Image: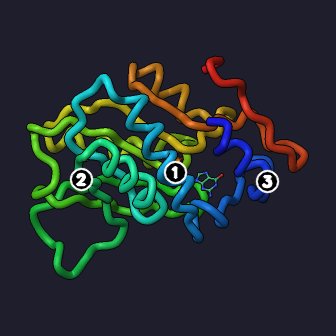
Amino acid sequence: MELLEQKILSEGKVLSDTVVKVDSFLNHQVDPVLMQKIGEEFAARFSDKKITKVLTLESSGIAPATMTGLTLGVPAVFARKRKSLTLVDHLYTAEVHSFTKNTTNEISVSKDYISKDDTVLILDDFLANGQAVRGLMDIVKQADASLAGVGIIIEKGFQEGGKQLREQDIRIESLATIASLEGGKIDFKNEGAT
Ligand code: 5GP
């Protein structure tokens, strides 16, 4: 997605050879116009599937998942990273190791919001080693729901998550794929080359 790549190039800050910061439009401040276009793009890419729920992880997944849900006309559900006082029982839970924070979180989704009748599109902001996506897939499996595929805003193609998930025949649509961050320079993998 050309617009997204331009935004990453102009506003992304390379923190190391493996981490890029995009706080100005995705992870802290949100660009609503870009999010709307991202939502339309995911909806178009998965238009062959009868998606009934978009599932993401709080907090950065919420904006793109909401916009995708808006375009598809379905709810967006976000897994919580912290145990809520009002959400104690009746949960699907999974363990997710955070790539950026090097911590393990238990994520949870109420059984009220995903069921076996759902066809779920999983969305996340970044794909690195695939832990977050695997945790969300675990929740879809526990609910006995169908997985339509996975939408990723920024895939880091030099990390293993995307390759491993595709080897498992999971459909992954990434809107921008970074081939390298070496030397502080952001290089994209050409679209269509995935
Ligand atoms: P994974 O679970 O695929 O290893 O990592 C994906 C998760 O880690 C995403 O949900 C995202 O929050 C975070 N993440 C991974 N790499 C980056 C990065 O380069 N920049 C930012 N901002 N977040 C990242």
Neighbour class for label 1 at 10 Å: few (<14), some, many (≥20)?
A: many
Give the spatial CA distance, label 1 vs label 3. 18 Å
Relative horizontal placement of residue 109, taking residue 123 as reference (left or right): left
| Disc marking residue 75 | 2
Asked whether the beta carbons under mark 2 and mark 1 sit within 8 Å of each other, the answer is no
Instruction: Tell me where residue 129 appears, x and y as whole percent.
Output: 55, 41
**Cβ–Cβ below 8 Å for labels 1 and 3?**
no
Residue at 34% across / 62% down in the picture?
106
Q: Which of the two labelled residues, at mark 2 and mark 1, occupies the earlier sequence position?
A: 2
Which quadrant would residue 96 be assigned to in this image?
Answer: bottom left
Is the CB–ligand 1 distance for label 1 below 8 Å?
Answer: yes
Q: At which x and y percent is residue 8?
A: 71, 50
Above or below, 50 relative to 79: above
**Foreground residue among 176 and 183:** 176
User: Which quarter of the figure has residue 128?
Assistant: top right
Numbered circle sitting on residue 10:
3
